[in-house]
Amino acid sequence: MATKLEGAERAAALAQLAEAGWSAVKGRDAIQKTFKFKNFIAAFGWMTQVAFWAEKLNHHPEWSNVYGTVDVTLITHDCDGLSELDLKLAKKMDALA
C-alpha cells in the first residue's frame, strides 16, 4: 500500500510539480494539470503512452479528453491523498508530453 506524502516532503514535491504546471485540487489531496496537444491524434497517442506507464506502476489517472486537450487528476486512492506514485506518474506524463 502506498504511503501518503505529508509535511516537508509533501510541500517540496508540490513546489517541484508547480514549476511544471501542476496545481493542487481544491477540496482534495490531489494534483491536476491540463495538457494541450496539436490535435486529437496527438492527445490520444500521448494518453496511450501514459496508459502503458500507468499499468507498469499499477497507478491510474483520473482523466478526460476533448479533442487536443487532456485534463488529468492524480491521487492515490489507497491512501486517500498524494503518494510517491503520483509524483512518478506526473513526471512521466510531463516527459512524454
Image (cartoon, grey):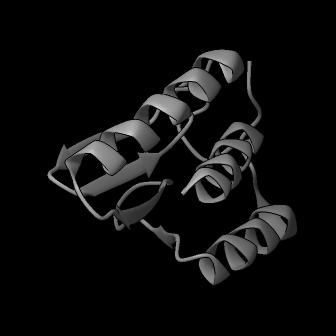
Give above or below for 63 relative to 18: above
Residue occupying the point 51% across, 42% down: 75
- Residue closest to the far left: 66
Give above or below for 16 relative to 4: below
Q: Quadrant of the C terminus?
A: bottom right
Seen in the image, is 41 located left or right of residue 92?
A: left
Give above or below for 89 relative to 57: below
Q: Nearer the viewer, residue 82 or 39?
A: 39
The part of the image, by quadrant, that contains residue 2 is: top right
The number of discs equals 0
Q: Quadrant of the N terminus?
A: top right
Q: Position of residue 22 (x, y in %)?
A: 52, 70
Q: Position of residue 29 (x, y in %)?
A: 50, 54
Residue occupying the point 35% across, 49% down: 42
Seen in the image, is 80 located left or right of residue 71?
A: right
Q: Position of residue 27 (x, y in %)?
A: 34, 61
Residue occupying the point 30% across, 55% down: 71
Q: Position of residue 15 (x, y in %)?
A: 71, 79
- Residue closest to the far right: 8
The part of the image, by quadrant, that contains residue 8 is: bottom right
Give above or below for 82 relative to 61: below
